[in-house]
Image (tube, grey):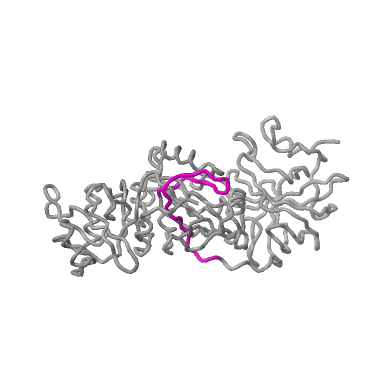
Amino acid sequence: METMAEYEEKRRFDETPEPEGAGAEADVDPLTAPTGDSFVIQQHYATRLHHDVRLEMLNGDTPVLVSWAVPKGLPRQRGERHLAIRTEDHPFEYGTFEGTIPEGNYGAGEVRIFDHGTYETVGRTDDRLTFRLDGDRLAGTYHLIKTGMEDDREQWLALLSEDHRPEPDEKPPLRPMLATLAERAFDNSAWSFEPKWDGIRALAMCDVETTLVSRNGNRVTAGYPELQALHDRLVAVDAILDGEIVAFEDGRPSFQRLQGRMHVRDSRRLEQLVRSTPVVFMAFDLLYLDGVDLTGEPFTERRRRLEETVVASDHLQLSPVVAGSGEALYEAARDQSLEGIIAKRNSSVYETGKRSRSWLKIKVILDADVVIVGWSEGEGRRSGGIGSLVMAVYEGHRLRYVGNVGTGFDRAGLEDAAERLSALATSDAPFDAKTIRSNRELRGAHWAEPSLVAHIEHRELTAAGKLRAPAFKGFRDDKDPRECTFDQLTPAELP
């Protein structure tokens, strides 16, 4: 039997993992060839992202995959008209191919199966093929209409006639699940362990575009242009990812570097920052996929689906996970000066908006998010300006004093703090008179409304309830001050 000429001429099978297959010399006519009953759609990251739509047809007695490259994928709404470019027939064995086509080869890049299943031909004319798909992701009736030739390639248009997909589940609330502080690392086969990333928590809503939502519900997509196409890196119709926006310095997460990105929205300045301080979305959970709410599924199932969905890139990475061995990961985190690790119970569901004991954070570097409620004047070089910031956390409905922080600032940081605090100045003290009298550093302090959250590193929580040797790392706008509570400073018992 003769080989498929154009398909095989373009490929070096000693270099590419694509199947050689066998077939006839000439491609079939999709408007007249006998049809099979299977289809596959492959998501192909070549020079640019596109979908390869392949329908089984017969070339004589040989099944082949008649193929179209569809840059925008098959339409999801009626009225949309997507370009589809007829490509060479592929061997039937290509229908199960996923993998990496090496650089230097035709179509170099990642290939993933977006959908597969059965199809039936509904009708054909001289220039139109109408077919019904029944796949894992897509179910509907589509038209492929031949419109002419360009650059020796047949040009077609893809249209959706009817969408047969079931009604999607309601999307879960966009509030992330939170971890409880634990005192030390542990090993347990019923748990999985991940690095703790020192960044900004965010949920990524992905469909035909990407929307990033911070933990307090603010949309922050505009501040991170390099993350605005995360949806293109997902094998999905739609999805909601949970993760962390991270900036790196010397291979390690740096909250201080990220601080310079948090509040910038000027497009020209952002262009510069994308080059000088690029960020990565570290994905670690999947809440919603292809119209299905996954929050009620166990963590291990959500993680499996996440790994199948994400195609990693420079700006989207999967947070690594280790099964059972928390102590070894903790030691590795300490050796690399990472913030710590997160432990997740394998059977745990996703508790939207709740701080849960099914997720535990074990810190290498102790840190805390605190409410800044004022400042004390400096001395020497800081005379007349800020010497230290007054830190508090909520204990029930009242604010509890946990110390002052005066280190970790550069000149720009002090100027930023002064500007923020001047806008929040108040004469109302956040503490009672006894607290102010018994803490000398509070006498003569200037007070501010409790709406500013700061990220602090420290050595320990003292018996008196203060943070020892605190150092300022940056302000954060993604956290509500009332989330800064005293119980978060004290570790929970291990499971």
**Is 73 one of the magenta-colored residues?**
no
Q: Residue at x 22, y 50 (%)?
A: 406
Quadrant hosting residue 488: bottom left
Q: Nearer the viewer, residue 16 or 356?
A: 356
Q: Nearer the viewer, residue 226 or 482?
A: 482
Quadrant hosting residue 335: top left
Image position of 1 (left or right of 367): right
Residue at far top of view: 14
Q: Nearer the viewer, residue 204 or 90?
A: 204
The answer to whether residue 299 is above or below residue 162 is above
Q: Position of residue 116 (x, y in %)?
A: 72, 53
Split into 4 quadrants, where in the image is the N terminus? top right
Q: Residue at x 77, y 59 (%)?
A: 129
Quadrant hosting residue 138: bottom right
Image position of 302 (left or right of 469): right
**Residue 205 in view in this figure:** yes
